[in-house]
Image (cartoon, rainbow, N blue to C red):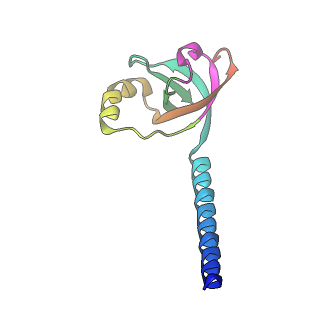
Amino acid sequence: MHTKLAKLSLWTVSILFVGLMATSVCATAQTAAGSQTITGCVQKGLESGGYYLVSGDKHYELYDAGKFSLADHVGQKVTVSGSVPTRTPAQEEKSQPYEKKEMGGMQHSDFQVTSLTVVSPTCK
């Protein structure tokens, strides 16, 4: 009886371990896949406390969760890493008029900054 219970326990632990490892690998792959790195010039947005980065023909509205002082980097060329944040429809509606004025004809994306490196003290 104890032998059957021991074998069942061993199988259960093995299956749980394999399942957890697979879940961990998938979660890591999703995180890495969602991460982006962008280089461009930081500019002051029209919205109070708003900042954006222009890279090529794309406008990125920057969100930093208070980790960086984006105001200190206005006019600088920077490289930022992060991902596209999840924003509520109410948040998007509030930002929309400002973003449209800032973007001109560029494509737009929101961007959650997780790291920032200064490439050049100016954008020229």
- Does the image show residue 56? no
Query: Quarter-wise, where is residue 99 in the image?
Result: top left
Residue at image point 61% right, 57% down: 24
Q: Position of residue 104 (x, y in %)?
A: 42, 27
Q: Position of residue 7 (x, y in %)?
A: 64, 80
Looking at the image, residue 92 sits to the left or right of residue 81; the answer is: left
- Does the image show residue 42? yes
Query: Quarter-wise, where is residue 72 in the image?
Result: top right
Q: Nearer the viewer, residue 18 or 76?
A: 18
Q: Position of residue 16 (x, y in %)?
A: 59, 67
On the rendered image, what quadrant is the N terminus found in?
bottom right
Q: Nearer the viewer, residue 37 or 115?
A: 115
Looking at the image, residue 72 sits to the left or right of residue 105; the answer is: right
Q: Position of residue 22 (x, y in %)?
A: 61, 63
In the image, the segment drawn in magenta is 67-81
Looking at the image, residue 58 sits to the left or right of residue 11; the answer is: left
